[in-house]
Image (cartoon, helix red, strand yellow):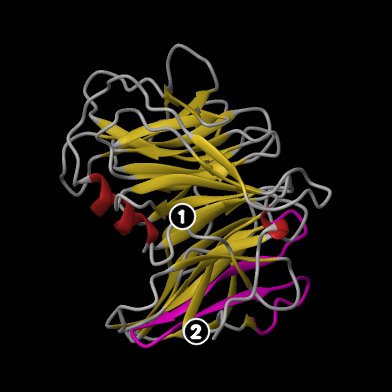
Amino acid sequence: MRRTRWAALAALLPVALLTPTAGVATAVAADDGCGTASVMVLGTLKASDRTGTVADINAGGLAVGVSGQQPVYWEGTRVHQVPVPDGFDGGRVAAVNGDGLMVGWFTAGTGPSNRTPFSYQEGAPAATLLPTGGADGWADDVDDSGRIVGTVDGAGRGAVWQDGQLLAPLPVADGLSIADVTAIDAGGSVVANGTIWNNGMEDYQEVVLLWESISDPARVLGPEVGSLQGWGRPALDDHGRVVGALQSSIEDRAVYWDPPEYGGPGEVASLPGFNSGDFTAISPSTHLAAGTALMRDATSPADQAEVWPGSGPALALPRLTADGASHAYAASDNGSVGGDAVNPSGDVRPVVWTCALGQAYVPEG
């Protein structure tokens, strides 16, 4: 679901590279031990960019994501473009590891098979295209050893790359398929959205899949849900906790699974005043989860970025305007959360909430 939203936003803008616009950092809360809590509005590649989003942040504060339709990263609030090779017109950076190795995909046109995965080291003159055997593909995460995970062959095969080489695909049992590989942790565990096929593929159920190593069979995290429900994109931390969302047309519920049993899942209540919530990211080692509170089938209030410290209730993060939507997609061990927020001009700006828990609050119901 998140990828669909990114694609829709990117389609609004033409591709161009002009002088980057400057970002702004506004302090909104006192130091609580992880630094000064602030809302940092990051720069964009050109003044006319009306969309931008932070997809990931490492512990050193290096943020990655998209500005307009272009793959970018930020040092502080200053934006830098990942070099886009000839034959491609844009893309997105999806993740960055602790050494500044970024992964994502380049795009070429608007067709259904227009993505090519890449890796890029901060400051390098060029990105490295990752092999897919000629199929459509994208890279979604990278660990600190340089292992990269993603999806190739449309949405059918879980991919692992190491040193620029495509390794054996993630194993799945008969009757299971992979929809989207989303994350890898420091120990090599991987999570993905998956599907269980029944009755000769005439019926299906959606699940979250967990590989405790890239050579192990996938473990199914329940419950299995039918066509009226689905699972949001799961994320996991280095302790084995998996976070995500159980979604339907009526409500989304933010959930988590804990090792070793992975029972449940546990649920975290929506923010007061909202009927739905999701988690889309979790920091590697501090259990800091990030996501969005929203109202299904309602126009008010607007979506609001939320953060969860790993226990207790979820908390709201400040908006840029009183009624402007915001979303959180990244959580770092340095206490920062990244995403986007609507500014007073109505533009969707890339945002980092530094020392997020230092400025989070319980909204009025």
The residues tagged by marks 2 and 1 sit, at their Cα atoms, a distance apart of 19 Å
Could you tell whether 61 is left or right of 276 in the image? right
Q: Pick the quarter of the image with the N terminus.
A: bottom left
Q: Nearer the viewer, residue 320 or 297?
A: 320
The residue labelled by disc 2 is: 273
Amino acid, disc 1: Leu
Q: Nearer the viewer, residue 339 or 91?
A: 339
Q: Position of residue 320 (x, y in %)?
A: 46, 55
The residue labelled by disc 1 is: 320
Q: Position of residue 26 (x, y in %)?
A: 57, 43
Q: Nearer the viewer, residue 356 or 265?
A: 356
Tag 1 secondary structure: loop
Span shown in magenta: 237-266
Report if residue 257 lies within the magenta region. Answer: yes
Q: Is residue 342 above or below residue 72?
A: below
Q: Nearer the viewer, residue 85 or 147?
A: 85
Amino acid, disc 2: Gly
Q: Is residue 108 visible?
A: yes
